[in-house]
Image (spheres, rainbow, N blue to C red):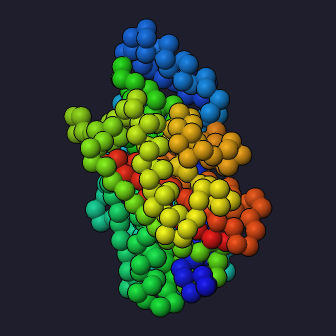
Amino acid sequence: MFNENVSIASLSTVTPPYVIKQAEAEAFLAKHYASKLGPKSLARMKKIFAHPGVLCRHIATDNIECLVNEPPDSRITRFTNWAIELSSQAINDSLAQAGLTKDTITGLVVNTCTGYICPGISTYLIEKLGLSKRIRIHDLVGSGCGGSIPNLQICKDMIQSNGDGVVVSVSVEICSATFQMADDLSLIVSNAIFADGAAATVLWKRPGIFTLVASASRCDTHHREDIRYIYKNGQLHNQLSQKLPAIASKTVSQVVMDLLTPWKLKPEDIEHWAFHPGGEKVINAIRNELGLSESQLQPTRDVLARYGNMSSPTVLFVLQEIIRKSIAPGDWCVMVAFGAGLSAHGFLLRH
């Protein structure tokens, strides 16, 4: 019954080559910003960076020293160049996996929240990859870490309204292009977990890896200030509330129920879970709220450890981790991402 629905034909994830371990990142911050941090913040920073939940991260630069006093113009140039490069790699890899060529693409949707350019990234990808100038394109901004799932929702709608089209979904974030440091716990935590990466998904109306069965979203604007970017002196600064684990876990739980109830499913019926790894405390809160086991959360924790939080592409890294392991015909998977707003978005998938 699901073969007539839109499915994921292939999925590719890409990171920049520069890798920094947590001890190196802490040393970098201490070298340049210790004089700006109070004793309490320095002690907190040491504890946060020593936590084994994140081991290393990929950063879109050849030299991390460029982050210190990076001029805004240089920063947006770095964002643009790396966003295009990583997105292009991910698209090419995903097309090759699906056995498709660029000429088959009828639509392209790109989401990001870590940089703004006009025209959007999609137009640069048309140029770099030599895509048809007549394909349908959309550039999405402002969805934060949850942005990849609204992207997939739009791609699904595009295909269902256009027969046998092939649509590519791209989530790309250069979180290092929003780097800031001050005596602020939000910034200390952000600089301990955020990283850069991209993911591209090829979608079509044929059998694939996972069928996009249903989606659900919730946005609780009452908690907007608990997770968002704010502008200070014309530059983005990440703002994270200490209440975030409790808030996010309840919203995620509501989205999960919105996905499962119409299909008469319960959490125990779901073989695979792909959550956005928003941090160790958030993962623990989701586990407790939904009553999941550690084994069900292992793909989420593994991605956080190896890559950190890359914002919107990260949940797709988790989904790829699940795909690489054993999935059986008929298996259910729930994918949920959450972020600025506070918003949470989910997809019910079936293999």
Image spot of residue 199 (x, y percent): 54, 60
In the figure, is residue 86 to the left or right of 38?
right
Image spot of residue 111 (x, y percent): 40, 61
* Residue sitting at x 24%, y 34%: 232
The furthest residue to the bottom: 163
Image spot of residue 340 (x, y percent): 35, 47
* Residue sitting at x 59%, y 75%: 211
Camera sees residue 111 = no
Camera sees residue 270 = yes
Question: Which quadrant is the N terminus positioned in?
Answer: bottom right
Q: Is residue 94 above or below residue 117?
A: below
* Residue sitting at x 46%, y 50%: 252
Closest to the observer, 89 or 200: 200
Closest to the observer, 129 or 184: 184
Image spot of residue 28 (x, y percent): 52, 24
The furthest residue to the left: 233
In which image quadrant can residue 116 be found? Answer: bottom left
The furthest residue to the front: 264
* Residue sitting at x 40%, y 72%: 154
Q: In this view, does 107 lie above or below 317?
A: below
In the figure, is residue 323 to the left or right of 238?
right
